[in-house]
Image: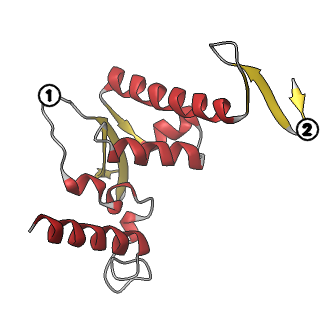
Amino acid sequence: MLEGNKKFYLDETGHGRYEAKINTTYESNLEQSILDLLNKCRETTLTEVTAKFGDYPQVHNKLKDLVLENKIFMYESKVKTEDRLEIEKKVKIVDPNASSWNPFNAQPCLTCMIMSECQLGNPVSPATCQEFQEWLEFEIEFEMLDD
């Protein structure tokens, strides 16, 4: 049912709601689907995840959230092809029994889509990255509060 441009639906309790539940349901289903995939195969490539769920900002943002929540781990791996060495982003499930929160999990470099291009002297570098600067400032503030 539509009222204006908003979608209307009934939730589990029978109450009427507009749009918000659709996004919430999508987000939670996307998270669970990603975790289900990784629980089955334990480790896969970012390319395989985006092939399954789409190369959309919501998918990349959900992966970042899962890294920050310490549910998954993303890293780069060097893969040798016939004539060259390529960098491949990999995603794996975090074993909750073998892992504890590590503040470096929140480092934006771990989920950066252009990490392989990031070097001092390049246009993309830690010195020019706004996300890295914000994270570093937060970490420094946090350390100062602990002292």
Q: Quadrant of residue 34?
A: top left
Q: Residue at x 33, y 77 (%)?
A: 126
The image shows a total of numbered marks equal to: 2
Q: Nearer the viewer, residue 144 or 70?
A: 144
Quadrant in which the N terminus appears: top right
- Residue under circle 1? 97
Position of residue 40 in the picture relative to residue 5 (left or right) = left
Amino acid type of the residue that numbered disc 1 sits on in the rendered structure: Asn
Q: Residue at x 53, y 42 (%)?
A: 59
- Residue under circle 2? 4
Q: Measuring from the top left, give residue 44's x and y in whole percent.
A: 36, 35
Q: Is residue 14 above or below residue 77?
A: above
The answer to whether residue 136 is seen in the rendering is: yes
Give the secondary structure at mark 2. Answer: loop
Q: Measuring from the top left, give residue 112's x and y in whole percent.
A: 41, 60
Q: Residue at x 55, y 37 (%)?
A: 51
Q: Measuring from the top left, give residue 122's x and y in whole percent.
A: 39, 83
Amino acid type of the residue that numbered disc 2 sits on in the rendered structure: Gly
Q: Nearer the viewer, residue 2 or 111?
A: 2
Q: Nearer the viewer, residue 13 or 31?
A: 13
Q: Quadrant of residue 58?
A: top right
Position of residue 101 in the picture relative to residue 16 (left or right) = left
Q: Residue furthest left?
A: 147
Q: Residues within 10 Å of mark 1 (few under 14, many from 20)?
A: few
Q: Mark 1 or mark 2, which has the lower sequence index?
A: 2
Q: Is residue 52 above or below residue 107?
A: above
Quadrant in which the C terminus appears: bottom left
Nearer the observer: mark 1 or 2; the answer is: 2
Q: Is residue 141 above or below residue 60?
A: below
Q: Is residue 79 above or below residue 32?
A: below
Q: Measuring from the top left, give residue 115's x and y in whole percent.
A: 37, 64
